[in-house]
Image (cartoon, rainbow, N blue to C red):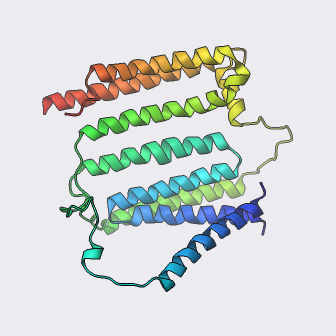
Amino acid sequence: MATSAIIFYTIAGIMIIFSLLAVTSRRILRAAVYLLFALAGTAALYFMLDYQFLAAVQLIVYAGGIVVLIIFSILLTTHINEKLEKPAWGKVFITATLVLGGLMLTLFVLTNHEFVLGTEPTAEATVSVIGERLLGYQAGGYVLPFEVISILLLAAMIGAIVIAKRNSTKS
Amino acid sequence: MSSEALIIFFLGGVVMVGAGILASNLLAPKSSNLQKAEPYECGVPTQGTSWIQFRVGYYLFAILFLIFDVETVFIFPWAVAMKKVGLSAFIEILLFLIILGLGLLYAWKKKALKWE
């Protein structure tokens, strides 16, 4: 077996174990931390694919930002000390059926789809290429979306403050 | 970098750390009592559990952090490509940061950064 395959299966195994722990843990804060490891495993997979930018985004935004947000929202709730109740069997059954259905569909598509290897050289997706395209104002550049993103982030920030401040004045 | 090197590096790390922990476990004299097992916090006896309910005020900080977190994602490729693109890149990022700075200014003005 090739060494890259060993690395891939190790990462995949770690991701599967932590994903299972995240959904089976009865303590919600631990579930959030297990999720963090699963997301870090995804970043490791992106690194394996030589896609450094997406891996960095995965680490910064998902493993860094989203998990912090999830942990904060957990800590805002009461009863974090208590263990979650065991889910009812009906719910377990329905969820298991849906998950199995999704798995079957994915496997069906993966095994039946004819994957054609492209002969044309694919565009490089290194960070510097992404940066040049992001800042370029000639054809193929994305400088306008780049600036629009800052406005979008500004809108998100103002929205968050407006909502949070309205709640705090009420209480 | 070949993946063999990565595996050897990883195994080396595991062996080094594992050997250290194992050796200290085998060699170190052990004594245990109840006081040693207590959680340490600046020498003051701890009160209650560490899993307490946080104040809502933290949530706004978390969201603001997330937004600036996303901002860094766009600064990374800029930082790598800046020298190659030149002056226009500098002006573009300046505009980007000024627009986001307005958000920070708004947060400041609305006293969202103030701890109440």
- Which of the 4 quarters of the picture holds residue A3? bottom right
Nearest to the observer: residue A35 or residue A131: A131
The quarter of the image holding the C terminus of chain B is top left
In this picture, residue A135 sits left or right of residue A91: right
Q: Is residue B37 above or below residue B54?
A: below
Task: Report the number of numbered marks.
Answer: 0
* Furthest residue in direction right, as rendered: A119
Where is the N terminus of chain B found, in terms of image quarters?
Answer: bottom right
Image point (24%, 47%), residue name:
B54
Q: Is residue A82 visible?
A: yes
Residue at 49% across, 22% down: A150
Position in image of residue B82 (x %, y %) = 67, 24
User: Can the viewer see residue A144 in this picture?
Assistant: no
- At x 45%, y 25%, the residue is A153
Locate residue B111: give its quadrant.
Answer: top left
Estimate the x, y position of residue A120 in percent, counting from the top left.
Answer: 85, 37
Q: Position of residue A27 (x, y in %)?
A: 32, 63
B98 over A167 or under it: above or below: above
User: In x, y percent, where is residue B83?
Assistant: 70, 23
Left or right relative to A4: residue A16 = left
* Vertical relation: A144 (above or below) B12: above
Q: Is residue A150 left or right of residue A140?
A: left
Q: Nearer the viewer, residue B48 or A167?
A: B48
For the point 68% across and 35% down, the residue is A127
Q: Is residue B98 left or right of residue B5?
A: left
